[in-house]
Image: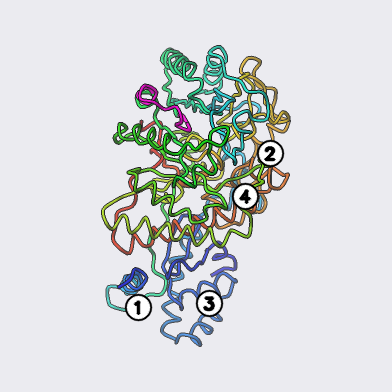
């Protein structure tokens, strides 16, 4: 054993089990007390002779020998990390980092655009990162002209990407459904001319999702994200209409109608939890009880521009409670599954054999490089989180890109290895360095991740691995459902 | 038997090799990620913001269609 070979192994207690996770390959191990001691000593770089002696003192000589043999299996998994040589950890030997970045910020090869077709919203959610729809500017709707120009811009920068993606977002995109229809028709027509397919997604608060709108979205969208926070009092507290009117009953009715007609096609019921509902597993249980199959619940991020006068903001003081709640949620999902009900929680999807490749894991979200956001005026930003932040404007769909050397270019060049504190983090291949915009809002730096976001990410990943361990021990099949994949659509 | 007790029972069963000898570090799953550099440019996977999560982008729970 060489020093450092086990440094990456993450050991953690999980709901009555002890688990070891190897980030380089997603290897997962169940350990007992002796195994825990052996791995702890190995992580400290201890050599075999001393490790054998210490484990033998505590657990006996035979156990120590067995532990040393079993450590080899962990070592062989831990040693298999091509990115150690690519500079992920030390920015040094082997392949240059650029080998894993497919396009330069000066000439991005785009795959997807997020079209903010509406900088307006019919709800007044208290935690909205988008300034309640306006993104800090004036309320406006995208015109069909801008939408068509965005499609042309995407096609002009997509290179040989066979499937392009357009995500309709806002604000509330249903406030501008006519333009959505026009853009979909135009993209299909232009894509056909150029031999490219298009996938479409739409994120909606479902407040005006009537039968006609639902039928259109069901027919057109490869994935639909429907915002609903869970229990009525939780949802209504944070997602009221202007004036404070409750919206839960109407939204739930609309979402249920849509999902009932969706069949096996993809959708996600997506909610947000805050300090007001730290018992958020009860909200997932509520949503599962309403019959929803695909559920996502995300901690409120609360950027700098978000008012937080009523104490909803999550802080470092909540981390332990949130972690415990993620484990309660894992137990809840396991219990449902044992009773024959499979509910897929988005952030607990951990199946390594269907997961993304290393290249994707180090590249991260691709903001500004593979993916950009377009405002109603046609301005380009690295992603929807940066929309409206003038210094991050990257050009427009009419004028083209303004160059890769400003702040937007810095976003486009970000990757896992560019974030020093991420290089040695055990969760690095799961979060890929996290959300650049969240990191900027929390720390003022693009290369420092949001520490609170990191804590939540690690907590839910541990809970996800715990759930997978429980499934494996129970002989259950891995979760079949995953997020929408355009080439499989 | 509550679930924690059942879990320990299952765990201790899995901690024995076929010969009945107790194991201390038991693989539940091996390494299965794609190391293939050919996939760098494949770009079949979705861009993460296109998925369910619209407020903090994560990658690890995406599915590779290959």
Image-based side of A463 in relation to A307, left or right = left
Element marked by disc 1: loop
Q: CA distance from mark 1 to mark 2?
A: 56 Å
Mark 4 vs 1: CB contact within 8 A: no
Confirm whether circles 1 and 2 share one chain: no
Q: Chain of mark 3?
A: A
Q: Chain of mark 1?
A: B
Which x, y percent locates residue A149? 56, 14
Residue on which the image places disc 3: A48
- Tell me the crowding category of disc 1: few under 14, some 14 to 19, or many 20 or more residues within 10 angstroms, Cα based: some
**Quadrant where the C terminus of chain A lies?**
top left
Residue on which the image places disc 4: A313
Image: magenta residue range? A202-216
Residue on which the image places disc 2: A305
Q: CA distance from mark 3 to mark 4?
A: 48 Å
Confirm whether circles 4 and 2 share one chain: yes
Which of the 4 quarters of the picture holds residue A117?
A: top right
Element marked by disc 4: loop
């Amino acid at each position: 054993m060489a020093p450092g070979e086990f440094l990456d192994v993450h050991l953690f207690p999980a709901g009555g089990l002890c688990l070891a996770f190897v980030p380089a390959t997603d290897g997962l191990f169940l350990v007992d007390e002796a195994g825990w001691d052996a791995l702890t000593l190995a992580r400290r770089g201890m050599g075999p002779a001393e490790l054998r002696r210490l484990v033998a003192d505590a657990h006996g000589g035979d156990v120590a020998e067995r532990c040393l043999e079993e450590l080899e299996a962990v070592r062989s998994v831990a040693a298999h990390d091509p990115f150690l040589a690519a500079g992920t950890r030390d920015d040094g030997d082997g392949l240059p980092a650029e080998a894993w970045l497919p396009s330069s910020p000066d000439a991005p090869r785009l795959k997807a655009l997020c079209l903010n077709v509406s900088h307006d919203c019919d709800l007044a959610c208290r935690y909205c990162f988008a300034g309640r729809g306006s993104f800090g500017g004036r309320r406006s709707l995208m015109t069909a002209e801008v939408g068509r120009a965005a499609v042309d811009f995407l096609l002009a920068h997509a290179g040989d990407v066979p499937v392009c993606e357009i995500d309709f977002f806002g604000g509330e995109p249903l406030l501008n459904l006519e333009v959505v229809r026009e853009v979909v028709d135009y993209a299909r027509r232009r894509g056909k001319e150029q031999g490219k397919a298009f996938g479409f997604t739409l994120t909606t608060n479902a407040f005006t999702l009537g039968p006609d709108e639902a039928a259109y979205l069901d027919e057109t969208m490869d994935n639909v994200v429907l915002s609903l926070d869970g229990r009525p009092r939780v949802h209504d507290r944070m997602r009221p209409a202007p004036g404070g009117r409750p919206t839960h009953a109407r939204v739930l009715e609309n979402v249920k109608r849509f999902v009932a007609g969706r069949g096996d096609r993809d959708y996600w019921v997506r909610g947000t939890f805050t300090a007001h509902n730290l018992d958020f597993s009860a909200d997932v249980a509520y949503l599962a009880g309403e019959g929803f199959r695909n559920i996502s619940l995300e901690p409120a991020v609360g950027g700098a521009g978000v008012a937080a006068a009523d104490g909803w903001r999550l802080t470092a003081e909540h981390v332990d409670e949130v972690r415990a709640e993620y484990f309660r949620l894992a137990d809840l999902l396991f219990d449902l599954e044992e009773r024959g009900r499979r509910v897929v929680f988005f952030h607990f999807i951990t199946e390594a054999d269907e997961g993304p490749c290393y290249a994707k894991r180090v590249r991260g979200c691709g903001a500004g490089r593979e993916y950009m956001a377009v405002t109603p005026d046609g301005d380009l930003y690295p992603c929807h989180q940066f929309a409206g932040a003038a210094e991050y404007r990257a050009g427009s769909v009419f004028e083209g890109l303004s160059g890769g050397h400003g702040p937007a270019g810095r976003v486009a060049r970000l990757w896992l290895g560019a974030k020093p504190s991420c290089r040695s983090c055990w969760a690095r291949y799961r979060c890929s360095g996290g959300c650049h915009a969240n990191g900027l809002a929390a720390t003022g730096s693009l290369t420092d991740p949001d520490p609170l976001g990191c804590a939540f990410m690690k907590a839910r990943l541990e809970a996800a691995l715990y759930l997978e361990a429980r499934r494996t021990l129970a002989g259950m099949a891995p979760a079949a459902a995953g997020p929408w994949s355009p080439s499989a659509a | 038997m509550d679930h924690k007790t059942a879990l320990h029972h299952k765990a201790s069963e899995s901690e024995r090799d076929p010969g009945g000898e107790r194991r201390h570090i038991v693989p539940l799953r091996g390494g299965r990620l794609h190391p293939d550099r050919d996939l760098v440019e494949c770009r079949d996977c979705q861009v993460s913001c296109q998925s369910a999560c619209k407020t903090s982008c994560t990658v690890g729970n995406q599915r590779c269609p290959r």
